[in-house]
Image (tube, rainbow, N blue to C red):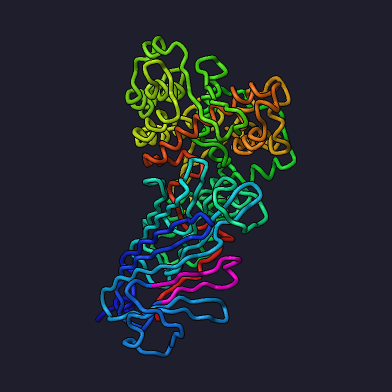
Amino acid sequence: MLSPDADANEISNLEMDIEINEDGSVSVTETREANMTEGTENYMTFNEEDMGEVEITDFSVEGYTEQSEWDPDANLEEKAGKYGMIDTEDGTELVWGIGEYGEQTYVVHYTLENVVRNLEDGQSLYWNFDTFSDLPTENFTMNVTSDNPFGEEMQFWGFGFEGDISRSDGGITWDAEESLTDANDAVLLMHFPPGTYDTDVTDDGTLEEEAEAAKDGSIYDDGSMSGWAIGSIVGGMVALGLAMTLIAKRFTSRMSKAGHIDSAAAIKRRNKENKTANPPQIDDYASVAFALKHLQMGGFEEIFQASLMKWTDEGRITIEIDGKDSKKLDKSKSEIIIHDYQKVETDNSESFKELSKKLKDMELGEDGYEPILWRMLLDAADDDGHIDEKRFTKWSKENAKSVSKVADEVTKYSLERLEAEEYFEFDKEKIFGITVPITIPTEKGESLLDHLVQYRNHLKENYSHVLEDENYRQHMIWSVLAGEGEEVKKHLAKLTPEGSSETYPSYVHYYYGPHLATKSWSTGLGQGGFNSSAASGSGGATGAGGGAGAGGGGGGGAR
């Protein structure tokens, strides 16, 4: 005899294609392969209280006929091949007939207007795309694209289920690694630079504030339990959300008592009123990659930009900007010139591949991670040691997969260096019968974490701080590493050569040239499918939890 669930309606495969339009609306196409055994209609729920200023338009189902007045009491045959909308007390439902029982494929289209919003310092898409979770869903994939290319400044996260979200062919792909039920969500958070989309919708708050709220209780919150640990503890259980929350809190408490590093939110709270005007005195930027990532600051791209700034300062390279009359800096083009290129190329005989192998085996010399980044420039240069934007984009696109592997190793490298320099210790603890790794900051390590947050507080107080003293070069470098590079860029972009003759050389040579070069490098990486968990806000593993405050998420099913 069949179990009660054996005959239930279910989705075997759901592919959700999301196109972000220039006006900030989102066009959605859901392709559902389903096994239908009961009921007369499918439905998606959009509750008014979760919609804000978002409106649903352009609903259709391929091969079906629209019904202006939907009759919920019609039978299976009468609803077959038809679709419509129902206004309810709580909001709106999109409905369409099941058709014949058995295997069915439905292709559903709809548009969500006003999804992209302006925040105080950028634009955001924060939406729960759960329109299906009342139907058990075996396989789920979300593909996100846009006519506006996704640059490396765009950040993205996924919440609601165990899976992997990454850049792919100029867009984003999010794959579930578990079957989805009504206990899951499908919350997508994307952050864009100001003006990316032509939207008039405005909300209070900053991108950072929204990201921190979204990450609370998720696997992106480094102070809570890891995604795999949650799975180990609650695997096989049909756990209620409250039960999972209680387990998570107890787990986090046990880890904290064992000395595990505090969450980024906790470190920021304890330093809320503290500031320091001095950046850290550390030249090996990759060595602190773990601390930067934990504090939700700069990632792999920022480490590369900081290295370009350092090499400029050391006289190893010059980055020229075309600087045409009246052209804003952020619209300029850059060209890297490697000094004494032929000699440098001869002295650096190891290839990018050979250095990458040494990194993987952690057999690097005293110079650490930096020679690998330097080798990228040497490989990208022409015979005269020049790298224009077109050349740099082409090289990074062709080598995106190799660069991804190098980026993936930066956290491992950082942890080894931080341990060797006695910033952190590493141990294991058995909690609820599960052996978990514990990252324990020493007094020196706690001081580093506090220093980074306090310096960021100093920058956020007034971004003109970067040009206030003779140490401006280090301020510019560490503003990038601390995750404030975009805000500093906005401050500097308002200036022109004509209007700032005294300070113009400083920010061109030590900030804006490396920024523009990194932008062309990052563009190529994105086009080539770059994917690394070391990239700040650039994907990786996703898990249950987080996503609080997102719009949408009304679910859907069949009846």
Tell me which residue sits at (48%, 56%) in the image. Answer: 21
Main secondary structure found in the magenta portion:
strand
* Residue 147 horizontal/vertical position (percent): 45, 51
- Depth check: 232 or 18 in front? 18
Residue extending farthest front:
325
Quarter of the image holding residue 353? top left
The quarter in which the C terminus is drawn is bottom left
Residue depicted at x 47% and y 59%:
160
The answer to whether residue 255 shows anywhere in this view is no
- Residue 256: x, y in percent? 58, 46
Judge whether residue 359 can be spotted in this image. yes
Which quadrant of the view contains residue 404? top left
**Image height check: is 415 above or below 112?**
above
| Residue at (57% x, 68% y) in the render | 51
Left/right placement of residue 490 relative to residue 335 reads right
Q: Which residues are magenta?
A: 43-60
Point out residue 277 in the picture as x, y percentages from the top left corner.
Answer: 71, 29
> How many marks overall?
0
548 inside magenta stretch: no
Q: Nearer the viewer, residue 98 or 2?
A: 98
- Where residue 293 appears, as percent x and y from the top left, is 53, 39
Q: On the rendered image, what quadrant is the N terminus found in?
A: bottom left
| Residue pictured at 62% horizontal, 23% vertical | 281
Tell me if residue 390 comes above or below residue 17 in the rendering: above
Residue 177 vs residue 390, the one in the foreground:
390
